[in-house]
Structures are given as structure tokens and as C-alpha cells.
Image (spheres, rainbow, N blue to C red):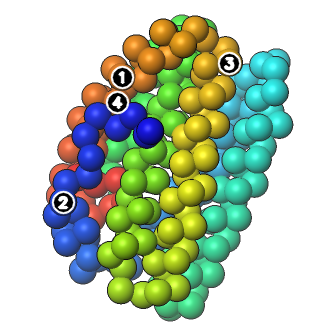
Amino acid sequence: MLNLAEPTRASWFASIEENLDLILIDHTHLEKRAASTALSMIFHYTGRSGLPRRLSEIVCEEMEHFTRMLDILETRNIELQKLKPAPYASKLVSEIRSNEPERFLDKLLVAALIEARSCERFSILGKEVDDRELADFYEELFEAEANHYTLYTGLAREHFPEKQVKQRLDELADKEVEALKAGRDLPRLHSY
């Protein structure tokens, strides 16, 4: 369903479990970035049928998640601080082609793959985190991220031929795994 070229390695949660506070901070920043990505596409692609309305829903939902993450940090007395980001997103974004309309397609598919990986990670966190309230929240986010993945890939299919979308999604899925592996030693939501 999520078109990830490789699943998360079985030992990922064990590798980040001792740094759950950092994962929560990182996750908070990622919600803000996800909203920013959708908002940026609204600015750049406003002439595309249906796109502003549908992406505005993502912007609102991601900002709601950001606010809820701020609440989680506050409840746990964790200060939101700047973190060195994992190289994941920047490496994946570097695969976006520069000429239109290919750039538009790639932006949609990169956003979709980031949502897909987040969805998978939230599923893991929902099952593994030893805090029922937090686990329930991650299970809720799992569904939201799956919907965002579907929305981004759906927009791609509305604006580009199915064969072109599938081929490029497969290519970028391979690059997504490489981007994930680049963050091998950093405890982040999108680390290897």
C-alpha cells in the first residue's frame, strides 16, 4: 500500500528507545515541516484543479499534530529545541527534478514517500512505546499519515498518467531507502 522499497529494520525501535525524548522533539519539528511543504505547494501550484483545497486540509491537520506534539512535550517537561535534522528529507528532496511538470510530480511523490515512512514508523511506535497515551496517539497518526500518502499519490495520478506516476514512484522509493540509510547513527524519526 505505501510503496516503500524496504520496510524499517526490525531493530529500529530498540536503537531509538533510549532517546525517545529526542524522537518526540524531532517529530514535533517534522509536523511543522509537513505543513510547510503542503503550504509551499499551494503557493506554487495554485492553478491546479482541486489542489489548494485538498492540500489546505493537510496543512491544517499537520498544524493540529504540531500543536498536539507541543502539548505532549509540555506534559513530559521536554523543551522544544533545535535539533540537527537527519539527512533523510534533504537527500530525498535533492532527487526532485528541476524542470516542470516533472518537478511537480516529484514534489508530490517525495511528500507521499515521507508520509509513507512516517506512517510505518508511527505504527511501530504505537505498538512499542511503553506509554498508553503516547501509543494511542501514534496509532491515530498512523491512519492520518496513510491518508496523506493517499492524497499525495492521488493528486499525482490526477495530473499525470498512471504509468509515469508508478515508474517515478518506484524510482524515488529506492532513493528513499538510500536517504533513510544516510541517517544511520542519528536517533531520529527518519533515521535508519
Disc 1 target residue: 170
Q: Which residue is mark 2?
A: 10
- Distance (Cα) linking label 3 and label 2: 35 Å
Amino acid of disc 1: Asp
Assess disc 2: are there few (<14), some (14-19) or many (≥20) residues with their C-alpha within 10 Å of its C-alpha: few
Q: Secondary structure at mark 2?
A: loop
The amino acid on which the numbered mark 4 sits, given as a three-letter code, is: Ala
- Cα distance between the residues tagged 4 and 1: 5 Å
Sequence-first disc among 4 and 3: 3
- What is the quadrant of residue 114 in the picture? top left
Residue depicted at 44% across the width and 39% down the height: 1
Q: Earlier in the sequence, mark 1 or mark 3?
A: 3
User: Eyeballing the image, is 81 above or below 174?
Assistant: below
Residue shown at 75%/54% (left/top)?
Answer: 60
Q: Nearer the viewer, residue 175 or 26?
A: 175
- Which badge, 2 or 4, is on the more N-terminal residue? 2
Q: Name the quadrant containing residue 113.
A: top left
- Determine whether label 2 and label 1 are within 8 Å by CB: no
Residue for badge 4? 173
Q: Nearer the viewer, residue 144 or 72?
A: 144
Residues at circles 4 and 1 in contact by the CB criterion of under 8 Å: yes
Q: Earlier in the sequence, mark 2 or mark 1?
A: 2
Q: Is residue 63 left or right of residue 169?
A: right
Write down the residue under mark 3.
158
Q: Position of residue 83 (x, y in %)?
A: 40, 64
Q: Is residue 16 visible?
A: yes
Residue at 27% across / 46% down in the picture?
Answer: 7
**Closer-to-camera residue (64/8):** 8
Q: Is residue 61 above or below residue 19?
A: above
Q: CA distance from mark 1 to mark 3?
A: 18 Å
